[in-house]
Image (spheres, rainbow, N blue to C red):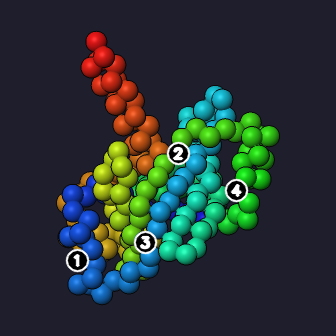
Amino acid sequence: MCMEIEAKLKIESPEQVERRLAELGAEFVAELRQTDYHFDDAKATLKKGDKALRIRRQVAADRTQLLMTYKGPKEESNFKKRQEIEFELADADAAEKLLAALGYHKALVVEKRRRLWRFGGCEVALDRLDLLGDYLEIEGSDDGKIDAVQENLGLSHLAHIPKSYAALLNARLRELNGEHRKSAH
């Protein structure tokens, strides 16, 4: 069973974090555009069970990659820790048709720009989402490595955000919809 262990932090200055990564000798990996298509059934069974099913379209320079991912419910931890099963797809349309045949529909689309680094045995992702702003994700094989990277970056004071981007975006859209209704009156 593959386990995803990560810390998600809301940051104010991705440029400052990148400068620090460069000072520390981190390896820049790639600049990516990711579009995540989240699926659920009509009763939102996956969302209610704190699970996720998505197809990701990831574009880096001259390469497009399609990935299907299942994420299980979060476990009790200082970090966002959950089962993750991920594999590459050859045909996203066929996968989407299969999901539809099983009763799953597109529930949400999350788009982000990601700058990916490697440092301290972890993947460090600087993410920008239009409606949400800038975030940093540190993903590693254990809590100690993630803690060390967060400390080396001078970000130990920032609280971990346990919610997924999908959950954060859903909350933001509800908030904006409420603001829109208020301003219409």
Check disc 4 and report the residue beneath it: 92
Residue 117 or 156: which is nearer the viewer?
117
Q: Is residue 73 above or below residue 4?
A: above
Specify whether 146 is left or right of 62.
left
Q: Position of residue 122 (x, y in %)?
A: 42, 75
Q: Are marks 1 and 4 in contact (CB under 8 Å)?
A: no
Q: Are marks 3 and 1 in contact (CB under 8 Å)?
A: no
Outermost bottom residue: 25
Residue at the image point whose x is 74% and y is 36% from the top: 103
Mark number for residue 174?
A: none
Q: Earlier in the sequence, mark 4 or mark 2?
A: 4
Check disc 3 and report the residue beneath it: 31
Label 2: which secondary element:
strand
Check disc 2 and report the residue beneath it: 109
Query: How far apart in space, not on screen, are marks 2 and 1 (Cα)?
Result: 31 Å
Amino acid residing under circle 4: Ala
Q: Quadrant of residue 127?
A: bottom left
Check disc 1 and report the residue beneath it: 19
Residue 2 or 123: which is nearer the viewer?
123
Residue 1 visible, this angle: no
Label 4: which secondary element:
helix
Amino acid residing under circle 2: Val
Amino acid residing under circle 1: Arg
Residue at the image point whose x is 67% and y is 38% from the top: 105
Question: Is disc 1 surrounded by few (<14), some (14 to 19) or many (20+) residues within 10 Å?
Answer: few
